[in-house]
Amino acid sequence: MKYMLLIYDRPDTRELFSGPDGKAMREQMDDLMAELTASGELVGGEGLADPAQTRSIRGQDGVPVVTDGPLAEAKEHFGGYLIVDCDTADRATEIALRWPNALFASMEVRPIMNAGGGEEM
Amino acid sequence: VSSPDAEELEGLLRRLAPQVLGALVRRHGQFDACEDATQEALIAAARQWPTDGLPDHPRGWLIAVATRRLVDELRAERSRRAREDIVADREERSGPAVGDAAMSAHDDALILLFLCCHPALTSASQIALTLRAVGGLSTGEIASAFLVPEATMAQRISRAKQAIKASGTAFELPPDDDRAERLRAVRHVLYLVFNEGYTATAGPDLQRVELAEEAIRITRMLHAMMPADGETAGLLALMLLTHSRRNARVTPDGALIALAGQDRSRWDRRMIDQGVALVERALATAAIGPYQLQAAIAALHAEAPSADETDWHQILALYTLLVRIAPSPVFALNRAVAVAMAKGPDAGLVELAAVESDDRLAGHHRVAAVRAHMLEFAGDRYAAAAAYRAAARLTTSLAERRYLESRAAAMPSIEADVETDEPAPTLSYMVTSKDEGENT
């Protein structure tokens, strides 16, 4: 079963990672990535650039309108994701708990829909 | 020499793959290195045979090429170690080929199956290694079947081989007192592969390996090795009876069709006949087991001329037996459907309430889907609509979500509370689970 782990950042996340606790957090991340790679659970993942570089598109009266910047100012923003293929939701949650952002911001674990034919109902 | 066509060639190579690997491991030990060498030999054959024609002894050719690769690899490994000035304390296990001729290729393939489904491996690794070492599929083919990157699948296979190495398991059949349990694990892995294939395919995709058919092929092989084993026969029958419906279960645009609504003329009669014969023979001759019972239930569906003529009382009796010999919340849920069909929706809902209290079913979309169907059957279409929507939110299959949402939309809304001329709905559909259990 594939899950997306959504990683949320705070505005000061980058400073946190370069601050006194940063080294430990980076190592924690590297260790986890190495573990997921070795176990064959890691399917993919990316980190996103700063939200200041966002372009947003919103429908207004049936017309898509482009604006610079994120849709809404928020205390936390979407910073990146991992996709893992795990046996259980509990295992995916355990991985999310060990990502450093779980300590100072937020993580979300969401099942990925499969495009398959499903089962007869 | 005539060149084999692509399909014949692939079939031949895949059939020979476990025999070649078995012969290599028997002679040289070192399962992981032998597995790599066998894959390379298969690739070489796939490249050369279409132009050069089939060799006189394809199996011997593959063993010779694989052995050459293995020796090259071991030699390179030795010189690497020498360069790094590491004392080679590991003895090359290249003893005499004891009993090589006496042991049949079948035994080798069987030992390989046991090895690939070793309890030290995770289920994902068991599946990957079985498809590669026994099925003869490439890592890329397995990766695309499971929709993961090739590197991810390669890692699973490599980890599986490490685990086998670390377990120190010899290349021989498991001891007698362990055999039944290990065989159960093999059947379960094959069942998982089948289910993955059965639920994964939406429309023809020629690039993707048909996992359901691959599972049937390997299970057929296992059944041929142990024809008296009732549960292996039962598993093969269950797969065939389920797969016989593959052309009738989805519309051309990928929408699911409930069992009751399927065009039964599109069911594969040849597969049904095979499945029915297998399960009848197993039930008559072997100790009864869960796969045989599930196959017997599937056979009752397959033999019913129409959904209305399904023998639900017989199916209920089989589920009652199944739940007794193999207690599982999923089987209990399926039994509740049979209760509704045999005794009416109210009895079904009472049964469902008892099943629902099992924590292991918490959040399972099937529970809500079953409730929805029963409520619709009972005529409570508002409640049915709510249950269909709840089920649609819980499933992770796009096709199932689409089906459940369309059922919800077909229920009358509160505003349009009028009598309909629609005939009374009937409840007749399949409940299956990827984890265990099949059919209602």
Image (cartoon, rainbow, N blue to C red):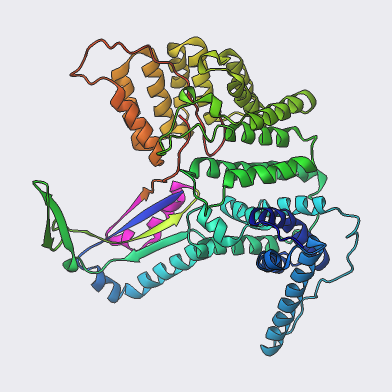
Q: Is residue B47 above or below residue B136?
A: below
Q: Residue at x 25, y 10 (%)?
A: B419
Provide residue B111's location: percent of width, then percent of height.
77, 52
Instruction: Please name whichever residue, B27 or A13, is drawn nearer the observer in this view of the structure.
Output: B27
Q: From this view, report whether residue B201 is shown above or below residue B316.
A: below
Which quarter of the image is occupied by the N terminus of chain B?
bottom right
* Residue B187 lies in quadrant: top right
Q: Left of B44 or right of it: where is A27?
A: left
Which is the main secondary structure of the residues drawn in magenta? Answer: helix
How many marks do you count on the picture? 0
Question: Which residue is depicted at the point 51% across and 65% down?
Answer: B151
Give the x, y percent position of residue B221.
Answer: 73, 45
The residue closer to the viewer here, B52 or B118, is: B52
The residue under the point 73% across, 77% down is B74
Question: Taking the image as drawn, is residue B345 in sight?
Answer: yes
Residue A102 falls inside the magenta stretch: yes
Q: Is residue B268 magenta?
A: no
Where residue B186 appears, x then y in whole percent?
68, 45
Foreground pick, B268 / B369: B268
Question: Magenta region: which residues?
Answer: A88-109
Instruction: Say whether residue B283 is left or right of residue B120.
Output: right
Q: Quadrant of residue A13?
A: bottom left
Percent across and percent down for residue B33 are 70, 69
